[in-house]
Image (tube, rainbow, N blue to C red):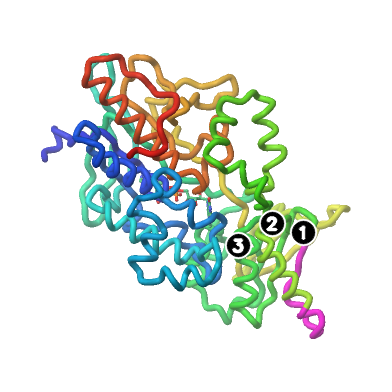
Amino acid sequence: MSQREPEIHDVVGVGFGPSNLSLAIALQECRTSGPDQEVSALFLERQPSFGWHRNMLLPSATMQISFLKDLVTFRNPTSSFSFVAFLHASGRLPRFVNNQDFFPTREEFHQYLEWAQARVADRVEYGSEVRSIRLVPGGAPEADRLRLDVAGSARRAGRVVEARNVVVSTGLVPNMPEGTERDERVWHSSEFLEKYRRTDPPKLRRVAVVGAGQSAAEITRFLYDELPHAEVYSVIPSYGYSVADDTPFANQVFDPGAVDDYYFGTEQTREAFWRYHRNTNYSVVDDEVIRDLYRRAYDDEVRGVERLRFLNLTRVTGVKRVGAETRVSLQVGPDAEVRELDCDALVCATGYRGMEPTGLLGDLDRHCLRDGAGRYRIERDYRVVTDPELTCGIYLQGGTEHSHGLTSSLLSNIAVRSGEIAGSIVARRAGRNAGRPVAVPVEVGGDLH
Ligand SMILES: Cc1cc2nc3c(=O)[nH]c(=O)nc-3n(C[C@H](O)[C@H](O)[C@H](O)COP(=O)(O)OP(=O)(O)OC[C@H]3O[C@@H](n4cnc5c(N)ncnc54)[C@H](O)[C@@H]3O)c2cc1C
């Protein structure tokens, strides 16, 4: 295809993590419902191959959701893309069941995702980073297509593609402590294993982990176990790790129905979601990991060893390089005592910011409408509300915490959410083909069959 005639798809997905993988499957399963349901789709992913938080695939780290919240089951329990179907195909189903555990390791869930992506790989291009999304130059006043500029890789030249619908799912953005730059000795948790493997572990005599969330606790445990000769410091802004509430009533905030409660709720009910249920996901740690760490510290104390040190009520105020070491400035305890800690590696498990598509949308952003607080206005079907002349669809998978609630950046609801997006795209296309005004369904069925 020449540069002047870009290929055109009904849907182009930007990013191919679990959210858009789930969408690719939902669109594929639409096809079985009839030819009018068939849409052409292409997914562009900047990584050279599929990878889901690869740098945090620590041994024994487990999923924080049930395996039944996989890519498909809540939308279509009979799908051949379920986690159970994967176990069956791998010959492990009986042994998995014998474990009597809802929470597989992240390593096994990653295998599942790789297995699923291999079955839709003809619609995915890896090593393809989308640089911008814009209006087709000189296009009709009714903008029904968008143009995506795709950077090339060593194997593929850069190019442009066009789409009637774009689904942006580029994931969370790593957050570093203010004024802290990453380097070979200062890492964010999102790059942890890659950076750790580049070190010479016996040379890591003192390491520090900043943060009080799940990743911080898992990395602290990993470093303590992997580096038996090293001191491991855990720098915690609170008094200690807080437990993630995954008890049954609290877990209902992740149910598909909770999205409607949030979306159609008042400001007051939305605020209550966050106030009461933040501790289901944010800056909290699984009970088992907390107990593991406490046990290790206690057993050391019994043996007269002090290797695992928790600096609670402590904040990082600065980081600088001193020779081969990293010097971390700290404000410690209730009196904000100033201390310095020299270490061989500093891991900032300081979380993420929500997905932010503004950079990708560039000039297109001015056609996207915002609410009083400056956030995108989003339809119930995850489509950004735009000027009426923009008839193409810009959907977001992620970055919709303000409109759709807690599950926006999580796996819990991806099966249903991607079904809703697929349903919306198919319904809007059917309306266009029939010459009807394009109707945006408020509620689209979870099960596409
Ligand atoms: C360590 C860790 C563990 C987690 N565990 C859980 C869990 O157990 N349960 C849960 O519910 N949630 C969990 N989460 C939350 C996490 O957000 C989801 O698991 C999941 O990654 C969301 O999928 P996604 O596809 O929306 O985003 P991502 O998985 O982040 O995928 C986004 C993809 O977009 C690609 N991309 C970005 N920009 C571009 C571009 N311009 N062009 C092309 N490609 C691009 C990225 O390379 C990436 O592959 C975890 C998060 C972390 C960090």
User: How far across and how far down the image is residue 317, in percent?
Assistant: 72, 52
Amino acid marked by disc 2: Ala
| Residue 304 inside the magenta-drawn segment | yes
Which element is circle 1 on? Answer: loop
Looking at the rendered image, the quarter that the C terminus falls into is: top left
Which element is circle 2 on? Answer: loop
Which element is circle 3 on? Answer: strand
Amino acid marked by disc 3: Val
The answer to whether the residues at label 1 and label 2 have Cβ atoms under 8 Å apart is: yes
User: How far across and how far down the image is residue 312, in percent?
Assistant: 78, 59
Looking at the rendered image, the quarter that the N terminus falls into is: top left
Task: Kindly tell me whether residue 168 is visible in this rendering.
Answer: no
> How far apart are the two marked residues, 2 and 3, measured between alpha carbons?
12 Å
Residue under numbered circle 2: 212
**To which quarter of the image does residue 393 belong?**
top left
Task: Give, as a single range, the part of the protein colored magenta.
Answer: 299-311
Q: Residue at x 66, y 65 (%)?
A: 289
